[in-house]
Amino acid sequence: MTYFKRDRFSGIAPGVAPNLLAEQFGQIAENIDFESGSLVPIKSEGSVEHTFTSSGNSVLSFYYYENSVTNRWLQFNSANVNVIEGPIPGDTYERIYWTGEAFPKMSVQTVIEGDGSAPFPESSWRLGVPAGESMGSVALSGTQDDTITPEDVSYVYTFVTAYGEEGPPSPPTAAVEATIGPSKQSATFNIPNYGGVSGSINFSRKRIYRSNTGSTNTTFQFVDDVPYAQTTYSDTKDAATLQEVLPSATWIGPPDDNTSLYPDGPLQGLTPVANGVFAGFTGKRLCLSEPYLPHAWPISYRITLEQDIVAIATTANGVVCLTKGKPYFVTGVDPSAMSALQIDIAQACVNRDSVVDMGELILYAGPDGLCAISGTEGRVVTRGLISPAQWNEDFAPTTIKAFQHEGTYVAFYDEGSEHKGWVFDPRANEAAISTINTENTVYAAWPDNESGELYILDALTSLANRRVRKYRGSSSTNKLRWKSKKLVMPQPTSMAWVGVFADSYPAPAGTDYTGVLRLKVWADDTLIADYYLHSSGSTYTMSATTPSVASSASLHEPIMRLPAVTARQWEAQVESYFPVRELCLAQTMDEIKQA
């Protein structure tokens, strides 16, 4: 006797011939969660959490800004906007930073909120503090003290924002020989204001530093700070009373929209690294910030790779740089001493939107399949499941928008007017791939790391304003569909019975069979049975559209007789809105019960 029974299921492996699939794999696996091993339908998208009503039809990125006053959904009309919170614990300004627009930006709660009128953020500041462009000038007054040796004195100044962010120093003034101090000489320092467009930077103060010669070298030390509007300062301080050494000599801003300095464009892909460091990229360069100072991006902290960077992602030990060539792993304990190691996998990143941090590994779309990076090791995780040709033709690697949800890799894409997606589940013993149906175009998503929920940005065809919904946030489920491998018998065989064991067999919702469990069976590629099964109490009712002569029948068990057909190749498919635990094909009733 011959029978087929499946009580543990997996996804599709289209790179394998249908007759050579392992028993648990299917030819079709749609809208299924395989975590339990059974066929469990995924839930539908939840109700609308928020609608972007002001210029809402242009929103391409969004972020939920939680703060101590009023939580807000932030909207951006640019794709690939990366928003991250400030690295300082207990930051009273509640700062956030982002890239993906014309230049890197930052803002604080009061500026984001503004007058409380959407859209948010209402305003922002350019990230980074510029250096003073002019050196300023010094005028001495008083008489040198002949009892001490005069020193060559020079001044620099820095700009400081209202949030305490200090920029790099101005050019030093020409040195003057002086003996500065009380009852000695005084120096009047003329301090220029910023010569560029100051409206995008929140200037608050100027800090003044003076050269001071010690036993081994000359440094600039803190003299005083003054309001930004003040343009002169009278210095009468002794050298011994000068304070800390200028800390910001290398603190330039991140790459921005200055095309002469940054021909590859502004910083992109802003992401937090360990120990309060931020990372981003432009062209071939990976850029790192000073620890806990996101406005300061020293040139010496930049690492140039061989190929243009497409995307970056952080791991526990460093930064993974995905390029147009091989990927790199950049590691080190301090941004001033990071080193880049080339990962031995010849898979470029073909789509920035495909990169997802899965915790222990980074997944991204390569030319030959879905790739995984863990530390300095890389591999194509879909090798053996999907051929490179199928990957590029059927899985839209260059256009997907991918995200992490409950340990799975979820990818959305459009194909013409159809909205599609697929899920890669690395949690299973055998990596599972399934397809999903989406109601509308998914423009972006935001993962809530605290709750584990994923929020998607979509819009109804008839709705101009885009909206936020919780992915799989509904109480209702999508219809699952799973088709078995092609069972090839050693000789022509008659399968007489088919059984399906599910959690529920709902009755029809209307005059048709909507919502009813459906079962199909093929013999030698011919559909021989198309059954609908529902129950009331302990009685099951079967209806059939194939064979056409079949009439409704009452059953004591969810086991149905098949037409008398002999064939070598058999396939079965189940569709359900409730979990399916077992699917059987058998020659006798006893085989189903004993299998």
Image (tube, helix red, strand yellow):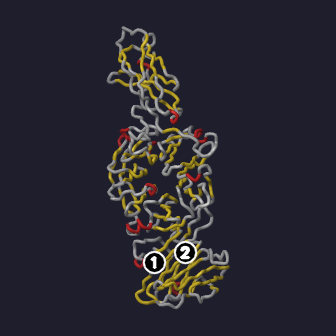
Residue 453 seen in this snapshot: no
Residue 451 seen in this snapshot: yes
Residue 443: percent from left, percent from top = 53, 56
Residue, disc 1: 485
Q: Considering only vertical position in the picture, is 582 above or below 236?
A: below
Question: Horizontally, is 330 left or right of 272 in the view?
Answer: left
Q: Considering only vertical position in the picture, is 347 above or below 171?
A: below
Quadrant of the rendered image containing residue 440: bottom right
The residue drawn where x is 40% and y is 58% is 350
Residue 318: percent from left, percent from top = 40, 49
SS category of the residue bearing label 2: strand
The residue drawn where x is 46% and y is 68% is 432
Residue 575: percent from left, percent from top = 56, 75
Count of numbered tags: 2
Cα distance between the residues tagged 2 and 1: 17 Å
Residue, disc 2: 581
Question: Horizontally, is 51 left or right of 234 in the view?
Answer: right
SS category of the residue bearing label 1: loop
Type of residue at label 2?
Arg
Type of residue at label 1?
Lys
